[in-house]
């Protein structure tokens, strides 16, 4: 069976499912293919907003789960990654328990990817490179917000924003706003990657790659493949 063309966004929207014969050789290749297809679809259609929006789940000190949506800012053979305030709730929970789960979901494309594994810090040079690529306002907000801390009201946030504006005026250079020491990122080193592909009759496809040895997402022989019932 021929593999779907990732540029064919109409076919992706039909809910054709996923067969083993259509899988690419490694988890990374399959993740990359689906992410690229979602980016193409997002540019062409209004029903695929924020194609890199990723839900990240952690647990607190009592074992209660926390989930929130971030943007996937890194994706390579080591896994997907995101940035955050290192004093935020998610970062404090990951420091205590690095086990993490994350999901990319594209409802209009009938597709989702689930990641389970361990969160590892993103190297500082990659964090800095990404930070300096952000728009001025996004860089400034990293300083203006004590992420996850209580705020007395919107006025409190606006005052903090004005303080950051005064401290780091926009001179049109990436380094106008330095990278905060308390700002960084995490990458999910996956032990399991599941590809969910919907079908209109709801007999969906779930194909899972499970780690069998050390190795990157691009090393096909580091993973076994299985199917789960929907």
Image (tube, grey):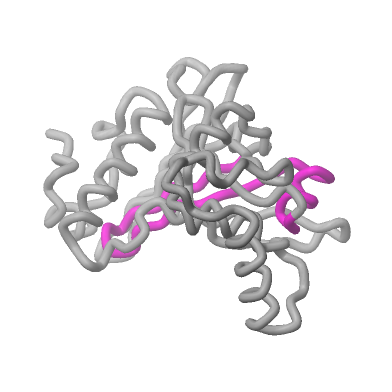
The image shows residue 203, relative to residue 226, as above or below, that is: below
Q: Residue at x 25, y 67 (%)?
A: 47
Residue 100: in magenta span: yes
The image shows residue 47, relative to residue 109, as above or below, that is: below
Q: How many marks?
A: 0
In the image, taking residue 81 as reference, residue 150 lies left or right, namely right
Residue 35 x %, y %: 33, 43
In the image, taking residue 109 as reference, residue 121 lies left or right, namely right
- Image-quadrant location for residue 96: top right
Residue 17: in magenta span: no
Residue 50 x %, y %: 36, 59
Residue 72 or residue 179, whichever sits in front: 179
In the image, taking residue 90 as reference, residue 168 lies left or right, namely left
Residue 37 or residue 122, whichever sits in front: 122
Residue 70 or residue 193, whichever sits in front: 70
Residue 25 x %, y %: 34, 23
Query: Can you say which quadrant of the picture contains the N terminus?
Result: top left
**Segment tinted magenta in the rendering:** 88-116
Query: Can you say which quadrant of the picture contains the C terminus?
Result: bottom left
């Amino acid at each position: 069976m021929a593999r779907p063309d990732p540029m064919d966004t109409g076919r992706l929207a039909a809910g054709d499912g996923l067969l083993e014969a259509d899988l690419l050789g490694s988890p990374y290749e399959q993740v990359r293919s689906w992410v690229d297809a979602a980016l193409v679809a997002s540019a062409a259609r209004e029903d695929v907003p924020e194609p890199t929006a990723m839900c990240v789940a952690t647990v607190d000190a009592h074992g209660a789960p926390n989930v929130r949506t971030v943007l996937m800012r890194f994706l390579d053979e080591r896994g997907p990654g995101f940035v955050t305030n290192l004093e935020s709730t998610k970062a404090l929970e990951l420091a205590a328990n690095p086990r993490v789960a994350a999901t990319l979901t594209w409802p209009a494309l009938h597709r989702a990817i689930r990641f389970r594994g361990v969160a590892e810090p993103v190297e500082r040079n990659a964090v800095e490179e990404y930070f300096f690529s952000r728009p001025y306002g996004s860089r400034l907000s990293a300083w203006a917000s004590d992420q996850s801390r209580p705020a007395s009201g919107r006025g409190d946030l606006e005052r903090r924003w004005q303080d950051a504006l005064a401290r780091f005026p926009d001179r049109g250079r990436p380094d106008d706003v330095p990278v905060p020491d308390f700002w960084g990122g995490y990458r999910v080193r996956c032990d399991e990657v599941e590809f969910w592909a919907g079908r209109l009759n709801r007999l969906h496809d779930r194909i899972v790659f499970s780690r069998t040895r050390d190795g990157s997402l691009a090393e096909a022989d580091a993973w076994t493949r299985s199917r789960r019932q929907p």
